[in-house]
Image (spheres, helix red, strand yellow):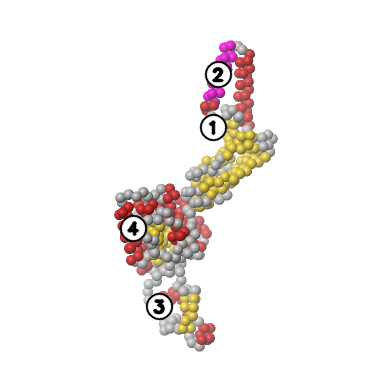
Amino acid sequence: MPDRGRQLRLLFVATVLVVAAFSTGLDFLFFLVYLFGALLAGSWWYSRRGLGGIRAGYHVLNPRAQVGEQLHAVYRVDNDAGWAKPWIEVSSDSTLPVSLPGRVIGIGASSSRQWLAKVNLTQRGSYRIGALRVRTGDPFGMFTSSITVGQATSVVVFPKVHSLPLWQLPPTPVDGSSATRRRLETASPLAASIRPYAPGDAINRIHWLSTMRHGEIQVKEFDPEQTADLWILLDLERTAHRGRGEQASVELAVSAAASIAVRTLSDNRAVGITASARRTHILTPDRGSRVEQKILHLLANVQADGTTPLPEVLVATLPRFKRGMTVCLITGSTDRDWVRPLAALPRRGVGAIAVRLDLPSFGEPDDGDVDEQRASAAAQHGLAEYGISQYLIHADDDLGQILGRRERAARA
């Protein structure tokens, strides 16, 4: 927009010149009036023609990025006119926390300018970068003209995904008789070793070549097969999270869910997720890059605005947990009521892992922290009592180090 203060000052000067010229009748003052009028008309004409022959656009190189990365966009302005454009302002509006920087450039006749704009991504979510706005004006700032070119672009910022090289799902507990376990082991394609025959071994486990070589019956020994599917249950109830901005507990929880999902999918295992936000989001287990994108899109936009208590979410999701699956619960809740429903899963042949956030470490200390710490310790002891693998994450922890280690005991 033109500078209104400058316009008012020039209008005041023009008014004084006109009044003075007609009051005194001096030729010099009339010359100044005519000169000022000519400059005014020339400025208006220049601003109207300033964008003639201008073509502009931009292209976002990575519209799908993660927190901690940079968003890159290439801007280009072409001048097809036969004269130079000394002042062109290029900008675009966006809903990003930090907008892509605009630029003021000069461009020669029949030439082009191109540059790369970068912005650091610090907050996950879905954002919109508007169409490109190109503006120019006269040298005195009296008049401006602008055009809007191109279309808006959507950008999705995924939560940060940490590398978890040592992450591994535990074998799912299997209930039933030894015959049932043998049938399951027989179904496993992972033959680890050969051993002598023992009463009760199935005939289809006999390794005939080794039997002929050793002169006695040898059977195949199978490694217990890892779980086929992982179900991530992300607790997004308001009371289960604390903190603001990048240091909020919900950000670590979402990042943990994304890291575990991506790591498990890379092992060609199916992953499903339940996110108990204001609306409960459910993605059934599936494999491949397509489900990875679905999970990351979901985690990019959820917030800690749920109202359903975690025990109710667990009970409601229970019918979806199938035998041979592992459930990974991610929560900051210090309420111990969810421990018992989670501990009941192994009796159904469903594995269980708990990723717990140390809620008092995510905010300013207050009188209630002591009670929360006691409740957190009680939940920790309850999980240990039932033999549930657990991780405890503090506000200043590195997720890659905590979730990437082999041990599954809670950190003190």
Which residue lies under the disc numbered 1? 1
Provide the major secondary structure of the magenta segment.
Answer: helix
Does the magenta portion include 14? yes
Dot placed on the residue nearer the N-terminal end, 4 or 2:
2
The residue that disc 3 covers is 179
Q: Are marks 1 and 2 in contact (CB under 8 Å)?
A: no
Q: Are marks 4 and 1 in contact (CB under 8 Å)?
A: no
Alpha-carbon span between mark 4 and mark 2: 76 Å
- Residue drawn 35% across the image and 63% down it: 383
Front position in the image: 363 or 64:
363
User: Which badge, 2 or 3, is on the more N-terminal residue?
Assistant: 2
Position of residue 353 measured from the top left corner of the image (x, y, whole percent) = 40, 63
In this view, the residue farthest toward the top is 24
Amino acid on which the number 4 mark rests in the picture:
Ser
> Which residue range is magenta in the image?
7-24
Foreground of the two, 376 or 294:
376
Please provide percent x and percent y for residue 268.
50, 64
Disc 1 versus disc 3: nearer the observer: 1
Q: Nearer the viewer, residue 311 or 247?
A: 247
Which of the 4 image quarters holds residue 235?
bottom left
Badge 1 local density, few (<14 within 10 Å), some, or many (20+)? few
Quadrant location of the N terminus in the rendered image: top right
Q: Which mark is residue 376?
A: 4
Please say if 63 is above or below 133. below
* Residue 276 visible: no
Q: Is residue 164 visible?
A: yes
